[in-house]
Image (cartoon, coloured by chain):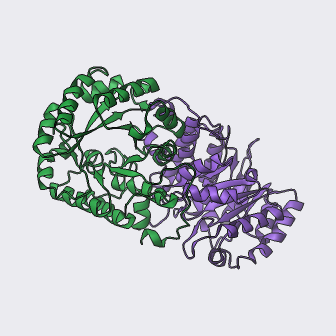
Chain colours: A purple, B green
């Protein structure tokens, strides 16, 4: 059944929302890297092609992190070599360090993203760096990328809670983020990596930054809060939202547990609010239903489940 | 793992929210009536007892609808006879008509709810009445209930979209609701029965009523919108929210598809916002995990899944 045939109410906006939102689709990278079933490169290429057909214009495609850490994305070079780039679509690639940047440049990438931590423990565990020394790794990567004409996005992870440290000081998150901006990142993506945040915390963090136009939000739906937090962020002026087609990124410990905010659930809300996204929801749902078949499990997206019953 | 041990951020409020919310727990009625596995009365009684232990003070207990239509609740009289009522907890019962009221009065019920439709088609299909003639059924039920000193709540279903009619006129919903209030209902519960609404539509409908203090909201999470819609309603001044422990009410057509907003996901948000509910989240999660075992399937609540991995 199509999204237009299920008894939809009128489109009704809500105060102080942007007229359009740019969806930064992370399904092929952040989504797949957390899926335990290894997906063949041909399937990934078809996935990216279908996402572009559905109207998504930012497709984070893969990552040049070491294959030892993320075997799912070990095919990054092969994938980028096989990619038919569309006009009007950008394909950012996650790049952890200078070696990753070298590989990205070889592959003809135009947009990269670096991945920083807002907490000491996660910096140590994920990057093998201190909170402070992570910037020594980013600085040459970013300056060389900028010199080569690339656009650089900065992810800030663990912005709200950290599984080892608990609460995260807002000032610490803002300091990490502002440092990435000063380094030359065009945009920050503020991540609730463990999905614990609620709307007041989101508003409070966003208010800590000087320029909301350079902020994107990246919510995980572990505790069901991702869409409410997105709504709060939109009301603060954020216009770029990260999400994952079909809610890809399920945790291997629990079948159908969720990772990222599902792009379909986001588009449903934005369509109802009259906020433009350029996305064709039915095409996107078809794509996610197809990908769920490839992964051999139902999509965690509510919209995908409801429309593919 | 307890809710307090997962890396929670500080509690941070958000503008113009109520300081406290009354949760109207519908798991035992609206939740179970949509579950295909028949639950023994002893299990239902333990469920209600555990929900009271977790701090919920409104427990919609069952329904006196004809057992032919809802076999799951055919044990309503037996359940109410076996119920150990707690001080400070009310146990409303759904009553479709005068016959149901007779049975409720016999059972010593103090709070009833009637179930109206906002659309012609659903009135016909669910009540075998026209939109207008449903009130002929409610009028004697409500007046006799009030004369007997009972409190009467009015549900209004299909407030946003209707699977047969599509969009629902706001004026029609408001007219149905105001008529129930004039009839003597103390509160309306505005239901998004098929889960299609988005926040602007919620705000628009709430603004159509004269007195927001008599409104509650009842969202289904079919399209993942329930919590965002709740946030929008709270910002409009609503202070009573319906939800279902563990997100009970899964559709039999799709495993783990969701029915009502999960009480745990609601409490997570309200706890983070510093809005009082009186609910002990860990006890509630334990209860829902136990009930999921009884039903032989995982809870659709994100919070329950995350905390019981």
Q: Is residue A41 visible?
A: no
Number of marks present in the image shown? 0
Q: Position of residue A103 (x, y in %)?
A: 78, 65
Indicate left or right for B232 with B151 as reference.
right
Q: Quadrant of the C terminus of chain A?
A: top left
Q: Quadrant of residue A96?
A: bottom right
Q: Nearer the viewer, residue B16 or B242?
A: B16
Indicate left or right for B155 with A48 as reference.
left
Q: Quadrant of residue A12?
A: top right
Indicate left or right for B74 with B256 as reference.
left
Q: Quadrant of residue B40?
A: bottom left
Q: Position of residue B249 (x, y in %)?
A: 32, 48
Q: Nearer the viewer, residue B288 or B284?
A: B284
Image position of A277 with respect to A230: above or below: above
Q: Quadrant of the N terminus of chain A?
A: top left
Q: Position of residue B14 (x, y in %)?
A: 57, 53
Q: Position of residue B130 (x, y in %)?
A: 29, 20
In the image, what residue occupies the spot 52% across and 68% down?
Answer: B8
Q: Is residue B62 visible?
A: yes
In the image, what residue occupies the spot 30% across and 20% down?
Answer: B132
**Furthest-right residue in view?**
A147
Indicate left or right for A214 with B200 as reference.
right
């Amino acid at each position: 059944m199509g999204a237009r045939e299920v008894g939809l109410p009128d489109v009704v906006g809500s105060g102080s929302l942007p007229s359009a939102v740019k969806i930064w689709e992370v399904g092929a990278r952040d989504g797949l890297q957390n899926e335990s079933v290894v997906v063949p490169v041909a399937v990934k290429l078809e996935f990216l092609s279908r996402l572009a057909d559905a109207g998504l214009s930012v497709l984070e495609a893969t990552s040049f992190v070491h294959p030892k850490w993320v075997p799912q994305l070990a095919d990054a070079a092969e994938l980028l070599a096989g990619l038919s780039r569309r006009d009007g679509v950008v394909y950012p690639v996650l790049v952890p360090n200078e070696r990753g940047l070298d590989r990205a440049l070889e592959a003809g990438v135009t947009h990269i993203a670096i991945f920083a931590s807002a907490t000491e423990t996660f910096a140590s565990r994920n990057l093998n760096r201190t909170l402070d020394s992570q910037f020594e790794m980013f600085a040459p990567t970013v300056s060389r990328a900028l010199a080569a004409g690339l656009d650089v996005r900065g992810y800030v992870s663990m912005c709200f809670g950290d599984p080892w440290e608990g609460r995260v000081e807002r000032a610490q998150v803002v300091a990490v983020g502002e440092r990435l901006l000063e380094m030359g990142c065009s945009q920050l993506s503020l991540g609730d990596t463990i999905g614990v945040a609620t709307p007041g915390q989101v508003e409070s963090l966003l208010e800590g930054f000087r320029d909301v136009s350079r902020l994107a939000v990246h919510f995980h739906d572990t505790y069901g809060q991702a869409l409410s937090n997105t709504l709060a962020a939109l009301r603060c002026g954020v216009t770029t939202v990260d999400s994952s087609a079909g809610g890809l990124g399920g945790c291997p410990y629990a079948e159908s547990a969720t990772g990222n905010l599902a792009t379909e659930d986001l588009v449903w809300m934005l369509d109802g609010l009259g906020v433009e996204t350029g996305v064709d929801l039915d095409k996107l749902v078809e794509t996610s239903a197809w990908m769920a078949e490839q992964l051999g499990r139902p999509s965690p997206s509510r919209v995908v489940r409801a429309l593919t019953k």
